[in-house]
Amino acid sequence: MSADQQVADLEQQVATLSAQLETANLAHLDLQNRLRQSEGMISVLSEHTSDMTYIVNRGGHFSFVSPSICKLTDYDLDEILRAEPSAFIHVDDVEMVREAIADAFNEPGTIIPINDHRVRHRDLKWLYFEGSAICMPEESGVEGVVVSCHDVTERKQQEETIYRQANYDTLTGLPNRLMFADRLATALLRGHRERHQVGLLFIDLDGFKKVNDTLGHNAGDDLLKEVAVRLAACVRQDDTIARLGGDEFTVILPNIHGPNDTEVVAKKIIERVREAIYLGESEVYVSASIGITLYPDDSEDQETLIKHADTAMYEAKAAGRRTYKFFTANMNQAAQEKMALESELRSAIERDEFDIRYQPIIDLKTGEITGTEALVRWNHPTRGITSPDVFIPLAEEQGLIVPIGEWVFRQACQMAHNWRETGRHDLQMAINVSPRQCQEPGFEEIVDRILAETQLPPSCITLEITESLFIEGADESAVTALHNRRAKGTLLSLDDFGTGYSSLSYLKRFPVDVLKIDREFVNDVTTAPEDQALCRAVIAMAHAFSLDVVGEGVETIEHARVLRDMGCDRAQGYLISKPLTAQDLDVFLNEWPGISF
Ligand code: C2E
Ligand code: MG
Ligand code: MG
């Protein structure tokens, strides 16, 4: 081959190579472009996605983090890369994530799920993420485990809200009835397994209704919130305080050594709750009545324990409030009897089991009968004649006092009507009404209707109310109803004076016509100087208010004499007569000889 030929060949080869190189270059360029393009896409994607992706190498360090993490957590890329992955994960969740990554390393190519876990945001709140981890095969060129997770914070928050709404009381933030039942079940199970006692306290506030009625529901809500805080301060971390509703709270003491432990908590609660509570401008006081029951001593059954604690709480109320009572078997029997009585009381009206006795009241100056007090009796089918002291409180609790009271009122008015028919125009009929009764919206209409039915002037009737109306009830509607009654001419009498708080200030707020000194004071008026002083003071004070005074429970002629000498206007008691049936009263009125001192 000539030299020229060789040169030409070489040139040809160079040209071909150049062309090939050109093509290769173009292809490379294209590849580079495409690479750049996809890198750009990845970068844009990873920056704008709400997912986070990172790669963890075998040393446990980040080897890549997607820029989206910076956006999600508000940390700089540098800050993240400098730290360990665990620095951003909640301590309680770190182990779970670490395990998932380790599993991924152990099983290359397998997708290992990572359950929801908390990731730290720069402003210290926690975000929830869930996703998966995978160790890429070697040929992929990615060294380490790729973790890819998405943000599920919103979903978790919604779940949390739903959970809170279902299990917690929205007002106080305390566990509600549902959560209480759940916690109690857990506590009992543990108590059973670990052979220890569990204490259950049932708390009911005394005087809450009064705050709610006088200061309004917002004040009532604030009070409950404050009480919740105080209760929480009386127990340990693993005890549960729950609000069952209204002013009812419970405490579960999941691990106690005996009744003493519950007693300590009960005392603490009573002390804390009785302290003044400030609601806006007002300073109010409530107290706590607490019933206590112990697992397994009182019962091993959850429902029964709750019932027992409730029963004991009622005992605490009955014992004068602001105290605690342990459940006892006797209480159980009493509670069962009470329940039976309650259901029998419901049907007692239809069965016509009520009856009225009339107890005469005399004028201490003239010895003449001025009227009677109507006193209800229940002819119980098995118990026989049952005292109102037994069933009136029950009837009040059950709301049955309204129909019973109406029945008594009608009977007594009918009786007063009969008196007038037989020419006894001067006799007054005193009828007991309970606070609950005059609080009832229809109270005034009922009284008006019955008076009209029996053609009685309103002034023939005296309504007897107890001091408790001012203390517990304190319902303005009841006071207004009685005011209206008085304006129409009916007399009002303050019964059992001296047994309640006996504050004279309510005589100003609530004008009455008659004051009845309770028999507790009359009983010892002849022997106890304090009772003598008290009766004398009450009579003087009542007269200063232009009230008539009746001494109750006058059993002896000495009682009558001492009271008369003190200026007491009238007397009622066994000395004159026990309460009588309508028939016996008629005989009594005809034959009453008067009284000689
Ligand atoms: P109260 O209104 O203070 O009635 C006087 C109570 O003292 C009556 O008891 C009467 O029997 C009793 N008593 C009268 N004189 C004497 C005495 O000399 N010595 C003794 N130891 N006791 C005497 P009772 O009938 O058992 O009534 C108890 C309470 O039940 C009444 O006390 C009254 O608060 C209430 N109550 C009675 N009837 C009704 C009613 O129809 N409605 C309402 N809401 N309460 C009633
Ligand atoms: Mg009375
Ligand atoms: Mg009385």
Image (cartoon, helix red, strand yellow):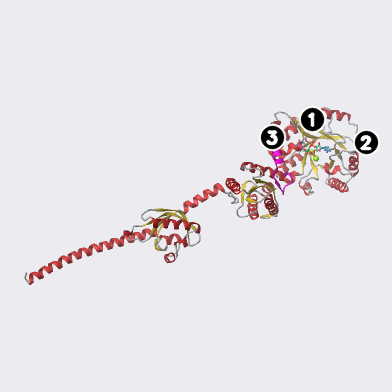
Q: Nearer the viewer, mark 3 or mark 1?
A: 3
Q: Is residue 52 above or below residue 306?
A: below
Q: Position of residue 425 (x, y in %)?
A: 83, 31
Q: Is residue 1 left or right of residue 114?
A: left
Instruction: Out of 574 and 330, give the one closest to the viewer.
Output: 330
Q: For the residues marked 3 and 2, what is the alpha-carbon distance in whole angstroms?
A: 48 Å
Q: Amino acid at mark 1?
A: Met
In reply to whether residue 287 is colored magenta, the answer given is: no
Q: Nearer the viewer, mark 3 or mark 2?
A: 3
Q: Secondary structure at mark 3?
A: helix
Q: Is residue 289 left or right of residue 584?
A: left
Q: Position of residue 206 (x, y in %)?
A: 70, 47
Residue bearing the label numbered 2: 596
Q: Secondary structure at mark 1?
A: helix
| Ligand 3 sits in quadrant | top right
Q: Which mark is on residue 340? A: 3
Q: Position of residue 128 (x, y in %)?
A: 47, 55
N-term-proximal mark, 3 vs 1: 3
Q: Amino acid at mark 3?
A: Ala
Instruction: Out of 147 and 153, give the one closest to the viewer.
Output: 147
In reply to whether residue 323 is colored magenta, the answer given is: yes
Q: Which mark is on residue 415? A: 1
Q: Is residue 358 above or below residue 142?
A: above
Label 3 CA crowd tier, 10 Å (few <14, some 14–19, many 20+): few
Residue 21 appears anywhere in the view: yes
Q: Is residue 267 left or right of residue 104?
A: right
Residue 489 appears anywhere in the view: no
In the image, the segment drawn in magenta is 317-336
